[in-house]
Amino acid sequence: MRPGAFDGSGLRIYTILYLLFLYAPIALLPIFAFNSGTIIAFPLQGFTTGWFTQMWENATLRRALANSLTIAVSSAILATCLGIFAARASTRFEFPGKGGIMGLIMVPMVLPEIIVAMSLLVVLLGVGVNLSILTVIVGHTLICMPYGIAILSTAFSTLDKSLEEAAYDLGETKWGAFRLVTLPLVMPGIISSLLISFTISLDEFIIAFFLSGNEPTLPTYIFSQLRFPKQIPTIMALGTVLVALSIVLLAAGEYFRRRGIAKIGGKDTGGFL
Amino acid sequence: MARRGLDAEAKQGLTLIAPPFLYALLVLAAPVLTILSYSFLKDGYLEVIREFTWANYTQVFTDPIVRTVMLRSLFVSGLVTLVTVVLAFPVAYYVSFMVRPERKSMWLFLITIPFWTSYLIRVFLWKVILGYNGVINSSLTGLGIIDEPLTFILYNVNAMVLTLAHAYAPFAILPIFVALEKIDRSLLEAGRDLGESRLMTFWRVTLPLAMPGVIAATLIVFIPTIGDYVTPEVIGGGKIPMIANLIQVQMLALDNRPLGSALAVTAMLIVAAVSVVFLFVNRRFLKVRQ
């Protein structure tokens, strides 16, 4: 093989093409959100921000947004609180049945969502619970919890045990040591768990679709509008806003994750998983 | 003394794990068990008759429609998984082996952004691209290349595979990347020093060591795609159902909860069976490593 024949330039080109394939459809969102034509086609017509105004004035959409935010904030908080318990227990303590219990808690990661949604729906209808955003919160908390635990476990496992012991030695109670020493150290993990749960819940469609009753959420609203070609430019505007929001949230999550690693003195290995 | 210490630790651990465990029991285990028991009961009009029967499973395994839908789901998710993993491997390889360590995070961040942007919007965008009045058709007619919109590009299995492969692409990269990162680089040098070509080193050292990541990627893509509901509705136009759509129709539209439950349980068993096969394969690769 001649020298330098395998410097990865071919792979580099492939990777860039791959990223283009990933981003190309998403790039259409802002292009057509600001295009004044009513049909989604090239060549572009003219520049307008009218679709954003129309989107903002849409009462159902605002209601869907309010519902989605309520659901995402509640599920993120609940999932992260439950996740803190599980992550702390699994990284710090040995107890009988640990593998099985943690396995059950993490199952929603590997179970198709339709099964979670359908089985919950059957039980809720059977018990006679009215479907509302509350039932969606119950479902979303369940599916966000494993992701929260994955992130929080990393935060808890890199924690130096001797710091807590030092706090006990200095006369702190268990709760005091947790609040004053452990919590601040795992705070970046908690914030990334909150952000990721929030993002998952905001985007989640299947559980929201089946468990929300008549209440719209953003994804179910989008789904209901897909049939009407006239609504597509407004949906493009909405998509643009959502993508921008996701990028901001992710950048914030990544920032806190890195800061967390720096705080504990670890080395960045990259990635959310 | 030691024994008591262990008990105290176990007690503390169990107290801590209790809230998430009870939540999972109540919201996950109980509903799944309910579905499991429903699948053995008879369907009456608007109610479930409490009488044991195998009829639902007989129907699941003999009904030609169910069989077609199950095979289609397996085919679509299998093909999506294959395409996604094969396309993802070189990207993961590039980021792990060719990118300077301090720039790896940036690449991973770029790859993960589309993965966190609304799944529904990504699926919807493919409809916008491929549809009757979509980007491709209206642009081609606008430019005078075609007279009538192409109808064969949407509402078929290929369009579904393309959409799902795009939607799940980043899922495959991360586990493969993690596996590649763990490979001891000196093993590759050893391979080269012992006279193997670059290609043979890749084939005999890198690839076997990366297999756990490939298998994880396979499962991460396969499991959600086989249960996908949105793509058959939006891209398949509701006329090419997969398992999820069939379960939904039986449970809600036709109100046949026992049959819907039997379908859901069968789908879970298929997912579990495929996972076990892959985990078994993985164990063989891990054994090779030792």
Image: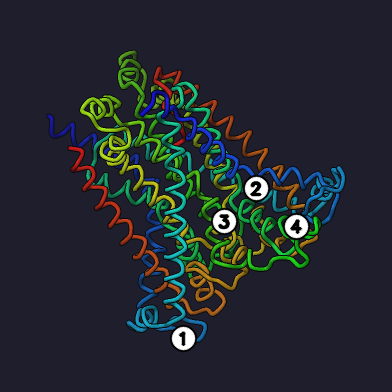
Determine whether B257 is above or below A198 in the image. below
The amino acid pointed to by label 2 is Pro
- Of discs 3 and 1, which sits in the foreground? 3
Report in which chain the residue with disc 4 lies. Answer: B
Image x and y of residue A54, in percent: 83, 50
Q: Residues under labels 4 and 1: Cα distance?
A: 53 Å
Q: Residues under labels 4 and 3: Cα distance?
A: 21 Å
Image x and y of residue B19, in percent: 39, 45
Label 2: how many residues lie within 10 Å, few (<14), some (14-19) or many (20+)?
some
Task: Same chain for labels 4 and 1? Say yes or no.
Answer: yes
The amino acid pointed to by label 4 is Leu
Q: Which residue is mark 1?
A: B44
Earlier residue among tags 3 and 1: 1
Q: Secondary structure at mark 2?
A: helix
- Of discs 4 and 2, which sits in the foreground? 4
Q: Which residue is mark 4?
A: B140
Earlier residue among tags 4 and 1: 1
Task: Same chain for labels 4 and 2? Say yes or no.
Answer: no
Q: Secondary structure at mark 4?
A: helix
Report in which chain the residue with disc 2 lies. Answer: A
Q: Secondary structure at mark 1?
A: strand
Task: Same chain for labels 2 and 1? Say yes or no.
Answer: no
Depth order, front residue of B44/A19: A19
Report the disc number at residue A25. 2
The amino acid pointed to by label 3 is Thr
Q: Secondary structure at mark 3?
A: helix
Determine whether A18 is above or below B95 in the image. below
Residue depicted at 39% across the width and 23% down the height: A3
Q: Residues under labels 2 and 3: Cα distance?
A: 10 Å
Report the disc number at residue B163. 3
